[in-house]
Amino acid sequence: MDGNGRWAEKNNLTKIQGHNQGMYAMKEIIKRSDVLGVKYLTVYAFSTENWKRSTEEVGGIFKLAVKFIAQELKELHENNVKVNILGDYRSRVPEDAVLSMDKAVETTKNNTGLQFNIALNYGSRAEIVRGVKKIAESVKNGDINVDDIDEDMLSMNLYTGAENGNIPDPELVIRTSGEERLSNFLLWQVAYSEFFFTDTLWPDFTPDEYEEILNSFGKRNRRFGGR
């Protein structure tokens, strides 16, 4: 969800106001995803690299996250949306944000509709290292043999694995704002994902543009390494 800061600058607003508008855009995309029958929606909310930003901006982002959960959790729950958190969000994220995320996960844990995954303090390389360490610990403890290690085992030990219900690899990755890179997002999981890049800044990304992209994706021929 890229472009909040540039949107704010373009509109002579603060970065926090840009992030606030981005939260509104996210809400609308969640609603349209639910209407369209999307089963999994994963948003890159805060990366492990975002800590390099100013203390004011980082603090503001987490305050907005708390505000979003407080305002939207009831509606999410009523609409059968299940919330999951991907990332090491307990290590550095402010306590009030952690508590908000925990509340969202606990409240919606039995829901069976759209699964809304929030990548928070997430970095894919760190995720893979964490998964490798978990497997190495199992080998050290004698629970598994080295020869047992395969792609499925590594997948199971990622944030998208067993601890969050084995989330399928994404079929489509959308990046807004004209940037054309992955930025350390789901590197293992997107091996055969389709990609769509749009110049639209995230706060201006509408449900209609989102639906157009999904329709375009539906016409693509996915060969998964075949002919």
Image (spheres, helix red, strand yellow):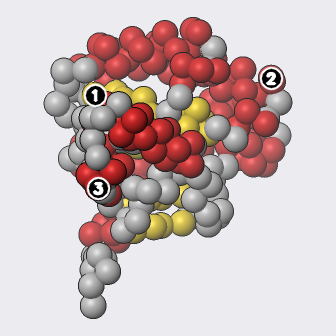
Quadrant the C terminus occupies: bottom left
Q: Is residue 78 left or right of residue 59?
A: left
Task: Kindly identify the residue that appears in the image at 57 percent across and 9 percent down.
Answer: 96
Residue drawn at (75%, 48%) of the image: 6
Relative to residue 172, is residue 5 depicted above or below?
above
The residue that label 3 is drawn on is 147
What's the residue at 45%, 44% (across, down)?
A: 132
Front residue of 125/26: it is 125
Residue sitting at x 27%, y 29% = 81
Q: Is residue 79 left or right of residue 67?
A: left
Say if mark 2 contacts mark 3, CB within 8 Å: no
Q: Amino acid at mark 2?
A: Glu
Image coordinates of residue 184 in percent, x first then y, are 59, 52
Q: Residue furthest bottom?
A: 227
Above or below for 154 versus 102: below
Q: Distance from label 1 to label 2 (Cα)?
A: 30 Å
Q: Which mark is on residue 82?
A: 1
Q: Position of residue 131 (x, y in %)?
A: 44, 41
CA gap between label 1 and label 3 equals: 36 Å
Q: Kindly identify which residue carries mark 2.
A: 56
Secondary structure under the numbered disc 3 in the rendered image: helix
**166 or 194: which is nearer to us?**
166
Sequence-wise, the earlier of marks 1 and 2 is 2
Q: Amino acid at mark 1?
A: Lys
